[in-house]
């Protein structure tokens, strides 16, 4: 028999195995049972499946009707998105004597849920464009829900808030993207995303880790088609430049771009400033300014085992 545990007077009972209370129960969707994987005891039966019903109930075999009961339950929405849509009638019995439809949809979705649903769709679209995984989308949706329910950013467009939430989620998950990358997949300006970013951090009383040159190095080098040796050298150069305080006040992105330019010029796989700037999202002049700061110490910045194709004294001076 299933045992239940209750933390306080208002907590819901927790179904668990009496013999193995710490084991993760396995749900048998076909039978609707909760089974203990240790001893096989059925600790819960007739569990409701909140997923979509994947059977077909139409007479036409060619027609696919896998969602007769609607989409899967969305916990981020207040109503759980448990709505029913009545299709448009085609027969005479579907209309009254005045030609009006007898059966009409009574949508129970509130305006706030509708706004959040539209924002979730926009977040998914933006994330798909830059190949972000599902965990980033889920974190972004949760951030947007918190901001929306607090009403702390009234007057700001939901698309701008969604873009800023996506930027924050990427940094919190350890896969940061630049403002320009987020701006490229949204309809919002970089300045507006930056404003919402600061307001959200203040409203939610949260923080994000500082970005470093290493956060972008592997992605930039991969997009440029540079070999592993050049990537490791660029990472080493950028880290040494920061440690020796050669680039004060420079953004990690511009330092990473300058390090990639120096490492590529010393190797056989040379890349121009424009090629690197297009991938990193920085201007050529920004790369040159950071490069000029690290060039005088170039001999000390390369890793000891780097195989030079172009000697240090032959590197471009710009």
Image: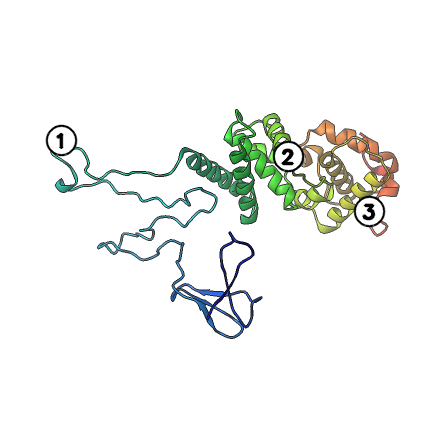
Left or right placement of residue 178 versus residue 45 in this view: right
Q: CA distance from mark 1 to mark 3?
A: 86 Å
Residue that label 1 marks: 98
Q: CA distance from mark 3 to mark 2?
A: 45 Å
Please determine whether, in this image, residue 176 is positioned above or below residue 21.
above
Q: CA distance from mark 1 to mark 2?
A: 56 Å
Disc ID at residue 308: 3
Specify few, some or many for label 1: CA neighbours under 10 Å numbering under 14, 14-19, or 20 or more: few
Residue 59 percent location from the top left of the image: 21, 55
Left or right placement of residue 40 versus residue 276 in this view: left
Which residue sits furthest front?
A: 9
Which residue is at 83% across, 32% downward? 293
Left or right placement of residue 295 versus residue 209 in this view: right
In the picture, residue 278 is in which quadrant? top right
State whether residue 185 appears in this view: no
Which residue sits furthest top?
A: 155
Residue 40 percent location from the top left of the image: 48, 74
Secondary structure of the residue carrying numbered label 1: loop
Secondary structure of the residue carrying numbered label 2: helix
Residue 225 percent location from the top left of the image: 66, 45
Camera-side mark, 3 or 2: 2
Please determine whether, in this image, residue 53 is positioned above or below residue 27.
above
Specify few, some or many for label 3: CA neighbours under 10 Å numbering under 14, 14-19, or 20 or more: some
Q: Earlier in the sequence, mark 1 or mark 2?
A: 1
Q: Earlier in the sequence, mark 1 or mark 3?
A: 1
Specify few, some or many for label 2: CA neighbours under 10 Å numbering under 14, 14-19, or 20 or more: some
Residue that label 2 marks: 201
Mark 1–mark 2 CB contact (< 8 Å): no
């Amino acid at each position: 028999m299933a045992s239940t545990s209750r933390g306080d007077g208002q907590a819901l009972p927790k179904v668990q195995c009496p013999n193995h209370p710490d084991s993760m129960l396995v749900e048998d969707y076909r039978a609707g049972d909760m089974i203990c994987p240790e001893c096989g005891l059925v600790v819960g039966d007739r569990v409701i499946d909140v997923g979509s019903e994947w059977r077909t109930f139409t007479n036409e075999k060619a027609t696919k009707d896998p969602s007769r009961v609607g989409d899967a339950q969305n916990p981020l929405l207040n109503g759980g998105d448990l709505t029913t849509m009545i299709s448009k009638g085609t027969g005479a019995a579907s209309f009254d004597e005045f030609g009006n439809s007898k059966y009409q949809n009574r949508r129970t979705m509130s305006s706030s849920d509708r706004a959040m649903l539209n924002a979730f769709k926009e977040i998914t679209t933006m994330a798909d464009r830059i190949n972000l995984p599902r965990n980033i989308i889920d974190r972004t949706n949760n951030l947007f829900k918190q901001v929306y329910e607090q009403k702390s950013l009234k007057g700001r467009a939901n698309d701008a808030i969604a873009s800023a939430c996506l930027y924050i989620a990427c940094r919190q998950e350890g896969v940061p993207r630049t403002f320009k990358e987020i701006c490229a997949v949204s309809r919002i300006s970089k300045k507006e995303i930056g404003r919402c970013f600061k307001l959200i951090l203040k409203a939610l009383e949260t923080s994000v880790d500082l970005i470093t040159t290493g956060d972008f190095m592997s992605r930039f080098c991969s997009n440029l088609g540079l070999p592993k040796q050049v990537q490791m050298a660029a990472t080493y150069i950028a880290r040494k430049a920061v440690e020796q305080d050669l680039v004060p006040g420079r953004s990690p992105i511009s330092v990473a771009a300058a390090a990639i330019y120096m490492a590529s010029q010393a190797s056989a796989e040379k890349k121009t400033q424009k090629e690197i700037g297009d991938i990193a999202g920085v201007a050529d002049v920004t790369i040159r300014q950071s490069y000029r700061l690290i060039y005088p110490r170039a001999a000390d910045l390369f890793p000891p085992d780097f195989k030079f194709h172009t000697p240090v004294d032959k590197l471009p001076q710009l």
